[in-house]
Structures are given as structure tokens and as C-alpha cells.
Amino acid sequence: MPIQLLHIYTTMSLFQKHEALLKDALNALIVRTYYSPYPENPKAYPEDADALAKNWISATMNNNYTALDQTDSNGWLGEEVSPFLQVGIGVRYPSFTHETILKHASLAQTAWANTSVNQRTGILIEALDRIKARFFDIAYATMHTTGQAYMMSFQASGPHANDRALEAIAMGYKELTSVPEKAEWIKSFGKFDLKMNKTWKPVPKGISLVIGCSTFPVWNTVPGLFAALITGNASIVKPHPKAILAIAIVIEEMQKVLAENGLPKQVVQLAVDTLNTPITKNLAENPLVKMIDFTGSSEFGNYIESLTKTTFTEKAGVNSIILDSVTDLKAVLGNIAFSASLYSGQMCTAPQNIFVSKDGVQTAEGLVTYEEVVKGIAAAITSLVDNPKAGPGTIGAIQAEATYKRILDAKNLGGNLVLDSKAIVNEEFKDARIATPVVIEVDKSQGAVYNRESFGPVLFVIKTAGLKDSVALAENLVKEKGALTCGAYTTNEEAKTLIATTMNNVFVPVSFNFTGAGFINSHAAFSDFHLTGGNPAGNASFANSEFVSKRFVWVGNREM
Amino acid sequence: MPIQLLHIYTTMSLFQKHEALLKDALNALIVRTYYSPYPENPKAYPEDADALAKNWISATMNNNYTALDQTDSNGWLGEEVSPFLQVGIGVRYPSFTHETILKHASLAQTAWANTSVNQRTGILIEALDRIKARFFDIAYATMHTTGQAYMMSFQASGPHANDRALEAIAMGYKELTSVPEKAEWIKSFGKFDLKMNKTWKPVPKGISLVIGCSTFPVWNTVPGLFAALITGNASIVKPHPKAILAIAIVIEEMQKVLAENGLPKQVVQLAVDTLNTPITKNLAENPLVKMIDFTGSSEFGNYIESLTKTTFTEKAGVNSIILDSVTDLKAVLGNIAFSASLYSGQMCTAPQNIFVSKDGVQTAEGLVTYEEVVKGIAAAITSLVDNPKAGPGTIGAIQAEATYKRILDAKNLGGNLVLDSKAIVNEEFKDARIATPVVIEVDKSQGAVYNRESFGPVLFVIKTAGLKDSVALAENLVKEKGALTCGAYTTNEEAKTLIATTMNNVFVPVSFNFTGAGFINSHAAFSDFHLTGGNPAGNASFANSEFVSKRFVWVGNREM
């Protein structure tokens, strides 16, 4: 069989291979009930997978990462540090000048743009299968760069990230096939017909740059990466210099599938840099780069948005909890404590500000005073973090030294220290950088303290005049600083309507009365939008139709 | 029946009344074959409609336009001039401070945002029915402000504009219903299920401003206006001070339907100003205004795009024709002549630059030299404009004095004058401002002459080294200045592929081998995208999914 035909046969069959999954994913987007083709329970995978991954991470540390494309590379670099070990992991990646990266991307762009939507779909879903086979490697890579505990590292960077990637592929496929490839257009003028043959195609905008963050190097990167790719744009992934390894595995697997299908590996490139010699702006400002996905600080995100390009940003936000009335206060405070402690509050969806009326909280067992509620929050956190079976696995480690310092300094911000941060012992990683949540009580007038993001496990309890006051304060905070989520507890229908209407109108979703296994931190692919794109926390949303449609242009030709 | 119930009953029935039409429109968006529910032939309407409209325009001129909402108005103003009569039409509209307009819009926004998608759909399609009953009034209003001849005034501001408005409604309905209102989300953890009740709603971004142009005051205004409205945003229409009357009729009818349905008329407001006391920037820069639709100059369009808002722009562009090889040269040149002469080249889709190889054009009857082609273009134009039955009705009148001066000055730009502009007689309007197309021959090296928009009937014939040269010149022009369309004539498949690929990759649609009744100027709703949004001629596209999805934000709540 000639090579060309073999190539076509192979890629066609990838689409056919994954067509049933694609249909399920497309249906999931419409019904938005629970859907995930990638099991989140490690036990659903081969028994030896974890052991093999442990061997892999040992062999990978202190070595050059040679599995990635190295064409025209100019050396090796890497400066990641494990928050669990507090030593460098010693992995070095091929480095390139930004000119080389852009040259490769331009060549790859031409080849990738000429693939069909079906080809791209098949290749990208196949890549997710290959990534799935590396979930355990990715888990250890995530742990030793972000400080996420094992289970979160596995789930967030593995199945949950794959879910989000598949969601982007499906949304892309939906949009890319929403206009027909051709139509015969006939307009009758009575005496004669005017006939035109029309064709339409979605033309990719061009090279994509995806800028990753240090805490969720895979989960926050793959939505933009796969959205850019499904719409025909070659992509450059520029991870945070302190969190490369996990996404390097993802790119390694993608490059393999591309090469197997006769396409340039450079359709997806890893662009690494260091804190002292950054290349992000060189890439971002280059006219060849047409779209940028960014997760990180508001300052850098605002800079990205100011570039005259198509941008998708997730920036800082301050998430609120409005505590009005509850059935079971203990269950509620336990839930809040877990949400605030999970990965030491280093989630973009972690709560920071808890608004409580000075008059306290109504419960099924009567009114609980404000003071008791504050104490209860502190007690719930202490109970969680002091439990050796739950604490270390929930809080993980602190990714960055700056975050660690912020936590220790929080008590000096001006509020009333309710619960100080402390170190707890992680039996497996005695050297881990650990800090439990700090709880600070402030009056509503102390906006300077709580009206800004204190990234990490810092909780403010804000004493308000009542429900309306709580809602107004949370609303204004969103207008100023943005938010990804809002938790609310109320047993009153009027209060519920007030909270929902007010927060939704400033484009923040509300999670009501979460207890048990439901946490405001979790946004499920194919159901929950992650970010709304409507408030200062970011201009994008995983994954609404815009998240893909902004990446290509419909162009139609007509012929008589 | 209580008033509230009556209200619900009435609006429900509007959706039901128009549901079949909506379904047809939704289907048309998918198949993109010919579709228009509003006949473009004036003869399809009541026999006395034209006579009644003539009476109406006579009665309307030199009077205050009292049919619009006047709450809190501070006077009357209007300075429109008929290009056919070259006298002021004397219509004065209620004027408001921009503060008043924004105050009204804010109140209306709350009411309109609270209507359901179905209510809005019913009300807006009903409004199109009412507008349809005013098509002849709108035609005369368009004639005496834009200088469009009668037939174009009728078709472009009447049925074709309604088609585009309906297209925006349908695309809006499609996007707004692409996510379910609710879902029960159940995640199994084996031992137990995690259940959440989820709801989603499309939250409108807020007040819309639609800035009209002087040449297509309805056709270019209603897509953005109806897109903003269907997505729940109250709208302020700020027409060009010289082209208000036609859109005033549209808004009058919309306000009537709104009031009948218990909604504030100010959901759609007309904001008039004068050239000397403009209010556009006051409105555009106000933080209450969240989205802006703009048609007009590149300079002002770039300013609009620079505002940190959601913007949809149509700016200047330079449209090219690439003349390679043809079957019937006479038919081709006649088609080009008509496209360039229609409304005196004052269409955003009119051709300006004709690229011809120095080696001439292959035809079924052999090679025609470059010189003969140039002469043929001039002859075709002369033949059209000198035909008293065709000329005046094709070219109409020149809308603006500045355009008129530009035409007369074109011969001094540096090229070789092939055909000068002249006045022809319009028997009905002896005082009309008329200028036939001017044809100027330039060498490809004279980019300074032809590489910019010469708005109006100015045609440049550019002598190139051959097809590849023609395509490269047209491509670079698009990159620099943008374009809405490109006409191409070739009988060669390779040439066709080269032209299509090259122009499509700079996001310009190509119309191949148009003769007879097909003209590159026409973009049909429900089939042709108007603008691609991918080149400097504008950032929007009538009507892709983004044209509506950027106007609202999906927000989802969860409850346990």
C-alpha cells in the first residue's frame, strides 16, 4: 500500500475508532448530566500501574527528559522543586529559542490546518487514550511539582483533565460541523433561477500559545490546548517553570500520536523557560501567535488581554461563602472546612471569605450565635487537619515559598486571629512544606484586609449586618476582583432567590447547601462551566461555544 | 382576566404564533440554502402600499417625528438631507441627553432581562411583521437619506434587513437553548450517589449600543440590534445623523410591540445627534454600555475596538477582483460594471481593485489583450450608466458631499484616467447628486494609489505580472486593509485553488465566475456570512454563533 494511502487509512480509522465516544461526549454536552469516560478511581486501572509509575518517577528524576522532540534544541533546562521533598527534582527539558519554536510552529501550522476536522478529532481522542495510559506517571509528576496530594494529583491531572480535554474536542467538533461543507443555493426570480454552488470552511486563526500555571499544570492547560488543536491551530505550551513535568508527559504522548499519523510532532511543542530567563512575552507578543490561553495572576492576565489577539484568561478571584441558615450546622462547617483545606486552598475555586450575620445562623436546632459559628469553623478545620488519616492527604503541600510566607503573615493583616496556621506531619514526606489553614475574623468595614485574593489556605470570616449585607458585600467583591464560585447556605426560599439573582447577575455561579461529598471547589466537565467569563476572574469559560468558535473563522466561497 | 395573566397569555401566544417560522429559520441556518420569509419583490405586497408610502413620506417631511417615545426628551433635532433632492428633509426627532438615554436603558434592561427567551423571540419576530407592513415607508426614508435608488432602498432596508434580523434572532435562539435549563446530576461513588440539581441561565451582559452608518441605516443596524435584544440586552440605536428616518420607523414599530406586551418602550431607544454635537463617544465610553455594534470608518471602528467592551465592528475594506480567464468576456465585464456601479460603489461589498495580467485574459474566443480588457471595462460601465432605463436606477445618488468630491478628485491620484465620472440625468430627481464610476489604470507599483479605500464609484485596474502576482497583491491588500469580498474569474482549476486557498487563508470569501444576476455585492442572510471577522475590515460576522454568544454569559447554579 502506498504510504499516502496508508496514512489516510490510519487516520480515518482513528475517527471511526473513537466515533462512538465522540457521540456520547456530544450528547453529554447537551444533557449536562454526569459524564466521564475516564474513571477517577485509581483502582479502575491496572493493578501494577502505581508501582510502575513509582519506578518511572524515580528513573525520570535527575535526568534529561529525552522523550520530547529535540529538533534544533539548544540545550537542557529545568528548575522544578518538589514541595513534598523540598529538593529539586532535577529533570531537564530540551530548550529552544523562541524564534526556533515559532519557526517550527509555523511549519506545523500549515500541515495541521490541512487536516480534516474528522482527522483531528480522531488523532486528539487517540492522544487522550495514550495519556490515560500515563495517568499514574502524571500523578507523581503533578505531586512533585505542585504539592497536590496523591489522590488529587491523580484525579485532577489525569481523568478530570482528560474529561476537560474531551469536552473541548466535542465542543470544537460541534461548532466546526455547525455549518455545512457545501450547499446548492437556488434563488428563483420567476422567469429564471439564480444558482450558486457554495462551500464553507472553518479556517484556523493560527498559532496558539497556552501559558500554564504552577498549581494545575495539566487541568488548566489542556482545555485551551485541545480547543486550539481541534480548530486547526498548532500549539505552543509554555508551562510555569516550576510545574513542567506533568504536561511534558501529555505532550510526549501527543507528539507520538502525531508522528504515527504522518504529522509534524511540532503541532504541539513544549516551550520551557526559567524564572530568570522567561520567554513568555517573546512568544505572546510575536505577531505569528494569534491566540493565547492563560492561567495565572491578574496582573499578567490583564497584560495578556491587552494584546490585540484572541485571548482566554483565568486570573485571580476571591470566592465567597454566604452563611445564612442551615439544617445541620456541623455538616455545613465540615464541608466548608474541607473546601478551604483541600490542597491548602491553592485552588482557584477555594473559598476565602465567609460572610456571617452578626445575628448568627439559624439551624434546625435553633439559632447559633455568630461567635459560636466562628469557633465552629475553626474547630471543623482543626478536626480535619489533625486527623492523621485525612489531614495530610487533604492539604497536600504548599507549592510556592511565596504562598507559604503569605500564610504565616496573614495574622498580621489586621483581623482577629481565630485559628493560626501550623505544620502537621506527613508520614510519607517528612520534609514537605506544610501549612494548615489560618482563620481570621474581620469586621465588614475591614475591606482592605479581605477584599483581595490571599492565595493559599487563608480564610476570613466577615461579620455583617445580616443577609442582605452579606450578599451586597459578596456582590461588590465580585465586581471588583472577580470570583469563580460562590457557596451559599440557606433554608429560606426568598434568601435563595436573592443570593442566586444577585450573584448570577455579576456572573458568578452559586452552589447551594453543599454538604457530604459535594464541594464548591469541583467543577465537572460536560456539566459545570469553569469560569463564566463575565467577571474580572477571567474572560473565558471551559467550555462554552465561544471557547472554540473564537479560534477559527468561517469563510465561504460561491461559484456560478 | 387579571392583567398579569393577560400579559403572559399574549406573549406566550406571540411565540406560538411565530414558532413555525422560527423552526424554518433554524433549519435554514443549518442547510444554508436559499431562504427568505420576506419577499423582495415590491409586487408581492398590497397594490396601494407604494402610493400610501408616498403620501406618508410627504406628510412626514418637515415635521416632528412624534411616533417615538419622548419621555424626558429635551427637544427636537434632525439634519438629514435628501441626496435626490439636495434639500433638507426637515424631519426632527426627540432628543435626549446621553444621561437620560442611559437611565432609561438601565430601567428597561432589568425588565427585558427578566423576559424568557421564548417571550423575546415572539416579541421580536412579531416586530419584524410590523416592520414588514412599513417596508414602503422605509424604502422612501432610505432613498431620501442614503441616495439609494428605489429598488435597493426597498430591498436592502426592507426584506433583506428583516432577513438579517430574523437570522440574528434564530442564531440567538439556537445558542440560548444550547444548554438545558436544568439537569439532575448524579455521580455514583459505588457506596452512595452524589446528587445535585443544576440550573443554567444565559445572563445578558447589559446595555447595547448600535452605531449606524449613513449608507445602510437599516441593513447594517438590525443584525446587531436583534442579536443584542434576543440575548436580553436593552439597546440604544445611535444612527448616523444624516440617515435616521428609516431606522426610526423600525424602532417605532418595535416600541409599539414592546408596549403592547407590557414592556418598557425604552428596551429599544433611538439616540439622535448632529455632526456638530455628537453623543456617540459619551454613550460608548459609559461603563453601563457593555457591548457596541459599529458600522463605519476604520478610524472610529478601531477606537470602538480599543474600548474594553464586547465589540462587533464593520470597518472599511478594499475589495478586489482577480481577472484570470473567462468563457464570455462581455458577460463578465458587464457583471463587474454592474457591481461597481450599483449604488455608485457605496456598498461595503463593492469592488474597487481589478487585477489583470499584463498578458491579458484568456477567453473561449482566444486571448484578449490587457489594453482591450481595460477598454472593455470602461465600455461596460458606459453602456450601463448611459442606458436611461438602467443607469439612474442602478447608480442612485451620492450620499455624502465628501464622497462626491473624492470621485471628482480621483483622476488626480496619479493613475491613468480611463473613464471619467460624469453626471447623468435622473428624470424623476433632476437635482440629484450623481456621479458615474471613474476608471483609473495603475501599475502594480503604484500601491499608494490603490492600496486604500476610495469609498464611492472609483475603480482601479491594476496591471500585474500575471495570476500569481495578482493573487499576491490582493492577498497583501487584505492583510493591510481588509476586505469583505473578492471576485475571481478563472476557467483553470489550479488557478481557482490558488485564489481560493490564498484569499480564504487571509479570511476573505471568494465569488467565482459571477455573471448574469449573481453579484459579489450581495450577501444573502441564512447562507452567506457578511464579513468573516478575521481580517482588518471588521471583527464581527453576520451571523456566526459568536455574533450572539458574546452578548450573554452562561451561569449555572447547583443545589444539594
Image (cartoon, coloured by chain):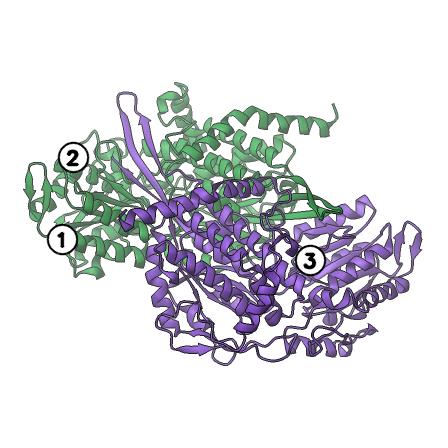
Chain colours: A green, B purple
Where does the image place residue B483, in percent across and percent down from the top left? 66, 59
Distance from disc 3 to disc 2, alpha carbons, whole Å, reads 66 Å
Q: Which mark is residue A43?
A: none
> Label for residue B521?
3
- Asked which secondary structure carries label 3, the reply is loop
Residue hosting label 2: A331
**Whole-percent x and y of residue A379?**
12, 40
Q: Subunit of mark 1?
A: A
Marks 1 and 3, how far apart at CA: 62 Å
Q: Are marks 3 and 2 in contact (CB under 8 Å)?
A: no
Q: Is residue B196 left or right of residue B500?
A: left
> In the orientation shown, which residue stands out farthest toward the front?
B48
Q: Are marks 3 and 2 on the same chain?
A: no
Marks 1/3 in contact by CB < 8 Å: the verdict is no
Q: What is the secondary structure assignment of the residue under circle 2?
A: helix
- Badge 1 and badge 3 in a common chain: no
Q: Nearer the viewer, residue B116 or B431?
A: B431
Q: Quadrant of the N terminus of chain A?
A: top right
Q: Amino acid at mark 1?
A: Gly
Which dot marks residue A466?
1
For mark 3, name the chain.
Answer: B
Q: Is residue A79 visible?
A: no
User: Could you tell which of marks 2 and 1 lies nearer the N-terminus?
Assistant: 2
What is the secondary structure assignment of the residue under circle 1? Answer: loop
Q: Is residue B121 left or right of residue B444?
A: left
Q: Position of residue A318 (x, y in %)?
A: 28, 52
Q: Are marks 2 and 1 on the same chain?
A: yes
